[in-house]
Amino acid sequence: MATETHAAEAAEGSGLVFHPMDQFIVKPLFGDGPVGMFTITNVTLWMFISVIAIVLLLVVGTSRRAIVPSRSQSLAELTYGFVYKMIEDVTGKDGLKYFPYIMTLFMFILFANMLGLIPGAFTTTSHIAVTGVLAVLVFATVTIMGFVKNGAGFLGLFWVASAPLALRPILAIIELISYFVRPVSHSIRLAGNMMAGHAVLKVFAGFAGSALIAPVAVGAITAMYALEMLVAFVQAYVFTILTCVYLKDALHPSH
């Protein structure tokens, strides 16, 4: 025990003690009390900033609708076309009526991911409480829509008619389990990737305080930061395209 204490003190004196998970702690924005259901926290703040940033890009940035678009208008139009094409390719023309919901989902996740890369910011999508709500909303929406549009025919999603008759009940159980696991995998994938990347960045930032390995650590931080920007976009894309896949299942449930 004495040896462990001495080692901890030596590490602390060398400036190598850091806590990469502290950046994910939810804190009240005002005061130091406990976090309740209606407490305004750092998560609340950065989700609000994400919404404001989206409004500035999509509403304010495109308000003039110039023939020769500005940078903000070009970016908004490119994003619009990207999501529109994604929905059309995955769900067909039937899914385009749900474009506003999917576009909102993509923009919120993308901006939350990107804003979380600002030093001192909070990555809201690193918390399962945030991504879980998004995933459950998608799951509930497509499930209700599936029954509303198809009635009992929506259950055809779980019945693999092309499989041998003896295997169909077993496959139906597997399909049913995998269906209800969707919101879990949908939310954990996003939160896990965002948390892991930011934790690694914090670790390299901690090593940057050591004079011996500072150049290597700074180089690693730069490379990881570039990678995290790519991951921020990819994870928003993956979450959205999976939503489109689930929407396609609701619109066309038969195998």
Image (spheres, helix red, strand yellow):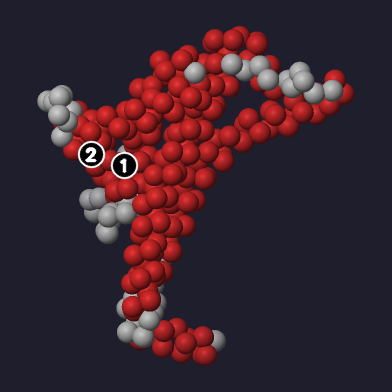
How far, Cα to Cα, is label 2 from label 1? 8 Å
Q: Residue at x 42, y 50 (%)?
A: 231
Q: Residue at x 37, y 39 (%)?
A: 109
| Percent position of residue 44, x then y | 30, 43
Decide: is 214 above or below 143: below
Indicate which disc residue 111 carries: 1
| Percent position of residue 63, x then y | 14, 26
Q: Is residue 62 left or right of residue 225?
A: left
Badge 1, how many Cα within 10 Å: few under 14, some, many 20+?
Answer: many
The quarter holding residue 78 reads top left
Residue pointed to by mark 2: 53
Decide: is 112 above or below 210: above
* Comes first in the chain, label 2 or label 1: 2
| Percent position of residue 82, x then y | 37, 31
| Percent position of residue 98, x then y | 41, 19
Residue 37 visible in the shown view: no
- Give amino acid for label 1: Phe
The quarter holding residue 176 reads top right
- Quadrant location of the N terminus in the rendered image: bottom right
Residue 234 visible in the shown view: yes
- Quadrant location of the C terminus in the rendered image: top right
Q: Residue at x 63, y 30 (%)?
A: 179
Nearer-the-camera pick, 165 or 47: 165
Indicate which disc residue 57 carries: none
Mark 2 in CB contact with mark 1 (< 8 angstroms) = yes
Q: Residue at x 39, y 69 (%)?
A: 220
- Give amino acid for label 2: Ala
Looking at the rendered structure, the secondary structure element under dot 1 is helix
Looking at this view, name the residue that lies furthest to the front: 68
